Image: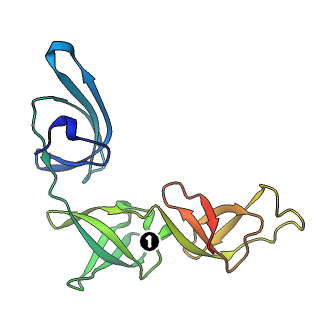
Amino acid sequence: MYNPTDLRKETLIELDGVPYKVIEYAQKQMGRGGSIVNTKLKNMITGGVIDKTFRNDERISPASVARKTVQYLYSDTSNLNFMDLETFETIELPLSVDENIPKYILEGSNIDVNMFDDKIIGFEWPKNVFLKVVLAPGGDKGNSASSTTKEVEVETGLKVQAPQFIKVGDSIKVDTRSGDYLERAK
């Protein structure tokens, strides 16, 4: 059991049988009345966000969310398909669960998932991924030292603004939170 003061960003808790992730946390001292903790909680199943205030004497249950590694197989126009690496069963999810999977994860790659009641409720994203450039317009001659960028396309179909010196065949590091170019792979 957690005390409200134990909560931090990214902590997983359970309220009324539903897992929530703390996305904002602020503690306020109320003088003789003790302290309260104001939080914003994201419902891990529906994605909805709620505001919740906890008194200092309340107890909060940690969410019983399991972590599992699955292999991303492929996606079509409406579904994502994964394989459970332990049972080799195919798991089909609607594309609306996370439309970023096909943009950043290569087919055949592994990704960690959060499971609640034997259902996938979310993904544990790597902070960045390396992807190969498949389409890049030629850079301006002599313009490689400036900070101008061009749009390149990587092997997953994602379009990224990258420096002029990036060419087809280069591997680049892309931030999965923002979709920004970070660096060329060494």
Q: Quadrant of residue 42?
A: top left
Which of 136/96 is in front? 136
The x, y position of residue 153, in whole percent, is: 64, 70
**How many labels, in total?**
1
Q: Which residue is painted at 90% across and 65% down in the image?
A: 142
Q: Is residue 15 left or right of residue 29?
A: left
Which of 41/46 is in front? 41
Q: Which residue is painted at 18% across and 35% down in the image?
A: 4
Q: Amino acid at mark 1?
A: Thr
Which of 118/22 is in front? 22
Residue, disc 1: 77
Where 55 sits versus 161, above or below? above
Q: Are there few (<14), some (14-19), or many (20+) residues within 10 Å of tag 1? A: few
Where 48 sits versus 117, above or below? above
The x, y position of residue 43, in whole percent, is: 25, 47
Where 81 sits versus 101, above or below? below
The x, y position of residue 20, in whole percent, is: 23, 47
Image quarter hosting the C terminus: bottom right
Q: Is residue 21 left or right of residue 149?
A: left
Q: Quadrant of residue 172?
A: bottom right
Looking at the image, the residue that sits furthest to the bottom is: 88
SS assignment at label 1: loop
Looking at the image, the residue that sits furthest to the top is: 32
Q: Quadrant of residue 124?
A: bottom left
Specify the color scheme. Answer: rainbow
